[in-house]
Amino acid sequence: MALLEAQDLTLAYDAVSIVDELSLQLPAGEVTIIVGANGCGKSTLLRGLARLLKPAGGKVLLDGQDIHTRPAREVAKLLGLLPQTPVAPDGITVRELVGRGRYPHQGWFKRWNTEDEAAVERAMKLTGTTDLAERPVDELSGGQRQRVWIAMALAQETELLLLDEPTTYLDVAHQLEVLDVISELNRTRGTTVVIVLHDLNLAARYADHLVALKQGKIVAAGHPAAVVTEDMVKNVFGMPCRVIPDPVAGTPLVLPIGRHRVLRAESVLAAKGIYRTKPPEVEPESSIGAPSPVTVESSIPASTQESTQASTAPEPAAGGAAAQEPAVDSTDGQAEATPLRRAEEISEMLAFATRVVDVASVGENFKRITFAGPDLVHFGAGPAPLDLRIKLMIPPAPVHGAALLENATGPELPQEFASLRPGAWLAEDQAAGWYRRWLALPVEQRGSMRTYTVRALRPAGHRDNRGDDPEIDVDFVLHLRTEGGRLTGGPATVWAAQAQLGDDLLILGPNSALCDETYGGIEFRPGSAKRILLAGDETAAPAICSILESLPAGITGHALIEVPTTDDIQGSSTRSGVSVQWLPRGSHPHGEMLAAAVRATVAIPAAGAVVTGAEPEDVDVDETILWETATASTQPFFAWLAGEAGMIKEMRRYLVRDAGMDRKQVAFMGYWRRGKAEG
Amino acid sequence: MSERSTRLRTSGPKRVSIATVNMLAALGIVTAIVLDLVAGRHPIELPGLLAALAGERVPGVSFILWEDRLPQAAVGVLAGAAFGASGAIFQRMLRNPLASPDVIGVGYGASAAAVTGMLLFGAQGIGLSLIACAGALAVALFIYAMADAGKHTGPRLILAGIAVAALLQALIQYLLTRADVRTAGDALRWLTGSLSASTWERAGLLAAALAILLPLLVPAAAKLRILELGDDSAAGLGLAVRPTRLGLILLGVGLTAVATAVTGPLAFVSFLAGPLALRLCGGRSNLGSAALIGALLVVAANFIASNIMPTVELPVGVVTGALGAPFLIWVLVRTNKEGT
């Protein structure tokens, strides 16, 4: 078996060295595939191995002998080559072309014989080109032609075969066809094969031995399962990716992350009637948006006195005019009875009892928790279900597996929220003021209220839903440290980190009957701006992804998202022309990369970003202000900043003071403060 | 090569074999020669012709036949074959129908050297032929040295050749304008290319040179078959690409040079013969066919040249030029259409 190896091989065109002191042994009888980015020298290496290039240093050994000291024909009997762009002479037939592969076996006195004929037949049979034998090569399709070229290389009957990008210009089916032929050749004849290939996934599938090249040096070599890792791909191709097992072959499968069109959020897809996970099925009878309150009411076990009272109350008369006036609780000192109505008829804010139905990790520091519950049929605001602001009612102490509403021994649900549940009876004058009443409760009793936004809302019957109830996704950023064996962080973070399937959580959110698209969420109100800047850290990442998904075509600008590690890059999709840049922080201080990127994006004076000549407003953002939402303006530029308060204010100061932007053009939200997790 | 040739091939169920083409070409050569003898400007009666061929002395016939017509025909056939084979070698090696030696400057090398010799040193006859030969070789080697950079040698060779051709043309024009009117006339006649000065001596010289060069077409064809697969493929098959290419260039230049030395540059013969042979053989290239077609072109052009105008006998180069120019235009137009 012929053994090919490179020893300290340096290959250069003119004075520029392309392959640099590279040593490589090609395992005999195996398929070696060389991968690497464009211009990494992989084709040059193959040319060097095939003695098409004289080394500038080192040598290529064939069976221990320098390949350049051996007669060319002798080498050609051991080593075949299929170059990247072979040229078929005009009018040549398949059989003639394949026959030319016999050239090294012929000579001055050894003319064409039966052995040559047999070799040609074998080569055509193995590549499935026998039927094409008499056809002119230039009439064949790309895939057929490539098989004919491989047949020509096979007719050479060498123990080694080098192929330079044999699948270029072929469609997927033909790529596989060609690689299958090569792999079969390796298996049936034991031919040692070396391929230079672009497609990393095909390389991982077909290689016994994978060599990754970067700037003329070997970065990794070995079995694909060991070589193809996210780090290697990042290093070699400079591309963030995920690597999962190929469901077909079990080999590593590289999924590029890219910058613009990666994950299609369910809501965007659903709007187009595309569902990813479940096959289409018949819509359940309980249609979206118009469930009967009675069903909802009866399906939820009453947990508080108020609810019980409400559920036993008679149906109100038509038009909602309450015939009866039951006594209401007197916690806020209201003794006077007021008319009772269904909560969903009068309160913009409703309390929704939900249960965790899915917990997924969407990045090293991101967790996506899916909540479901029958209450959620009343959840929503207008046709745009993105980023509705909600309040999570985190129980005072972590109670896992313990049902918040059903467990009588669990923490008491503040009465205000029981009466705010859909279907519950609510006094008209109590529809507002619930926050004040909640604040008045003792801290240990009321737990914490945390504001989040909804990443996706799927109505009941959505094919991606786990059950029959509507579902919402909420993305949590886990800013956690372990201190003394205990998870430390904001209450919502701690809750999310430990959340399990079946956990219950009360969520305050918009009543779909009374709220429209003006309902507050991420306060992204670009007005008529055509250029936008979105910038934020990981806490703003879900919001920015949502904004990107909702942006129409025709908007341009930049989205800059700083995340802790490359694993947190989530990908996002947008129809707009906004370019998305993920900035993995690594060991840089929080906000440093983001601030630099913002400065690079909005230069001083920001060309086109601001109306030139506009008087910069010297506004010092007060220490206490954490939130300023821009009103819809007619300016051409709009900036939206969110994340850690100090960082955001610094960027805001830069945009307004240094870059001279109108403060109305800049919305900023301090989601949390360093040192004070989740603000 | 072209849509047209593809259509030709697919429409016909069976291709014309190369042997048939060669036989027909040979037949055409003989026909053209005989036609010229019996139906040309000075027709020879058939009985007299046969008698003279048999060796009898036929007054008024033998001289014309043996000292004029037959040497002319012999030189025409040999030079045509040399031009044809040379053109085909270049065109196939460089994979470009434009790359014939007369287009890429080799022919101009011979012409410039010959004109220089004639006008400055009064060279004539064999001396002139040798000078032309040397000029062609020198120019070819110069062009090759300019073009050979390890890769893209083919296209560079064509470009360098065209540039050198322009340079040499300027040199020729300069020499002609400075020369005496009578010698300039001789030089111009030589530059057009003619068979009229053919003698047995010259035919013998040409035959001797071709006896060495033409057998080399056999290994040349074998190597061309590999080289035309592309440099990398050829190297993969164990062909030493650079020496082979240099050898082929020397062979092609040698063929063109010896033929030019005897007849002067016969415009477009080497350019036409290869593609015509390719067309006739149904898209397969063959050096032998190209040589035969080249010979046929020259003898046929000679017949036309001596008979087309009742009063004047045209130099054969005028006719080949008149045939070649439209063909060149056609090749250019078609190349444009294919966009390759």
Image (cartoon, coloured by chain):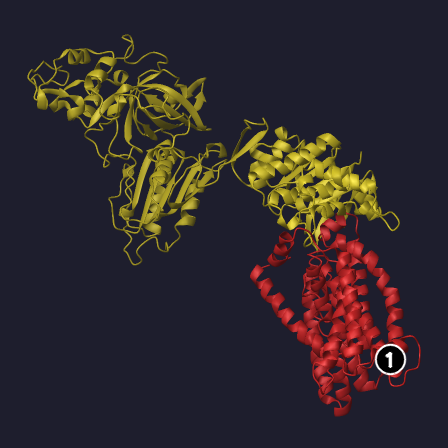
Chain colours: A yellow, B red
Number of residues whose C-alpha sits closer than 10 Å to that of mark 1, classed few (under 14), some (14–19) or many (20 or more): some
Quadrant for the N terminus of chain A in the image = top right
Question: Is label 1 in a helix, a strand or a loop?
Answer: helix
Looking at the picture, which amino acid does disc 1 mark? Gly
Quadrant for the C terminus of chain A in the image = top left
* Residue A184: % across, % down: 68, 32
* Residue B156: % across, % down: 68, 63
Residue at coordinates 58% horizontally, 45% vertically from top-left?
Answer: A169
Q: Is residue A376 above or below residue B328?
A: above
Residue B171 visible: yes
Residue B16 sits in which quadrant?
bottom right
Q: Is residue A436 above or below residue B302?
A: above
- Outermost residue, bottom side: B181
In front of the other: A242 or A234: A242
Residue A46 sits in which quadrant?
top right
- Outermost residue, right side: B56
Q: Is residue A176 left or right of residue B314?
A: left
In front of the other: A654 or A555: A555
Q: Is residue B297 left or right of residue A289?
A: right
Residue A334 sits in which quadrant?
top left
- Outermost residue, front side: B47
* Residue A86: % across, % down: 68, 49
Q: Chain of mark 1?
A: B
Q: Which residue is mark 1?
A: B48
Residue A6 visible: no
In front of the other: A121 or B209: A121
Residue at coordinates 37% horizontally, 21% vertically from top-left?
Answer: A466
In front of the other: A119 or A572: A119
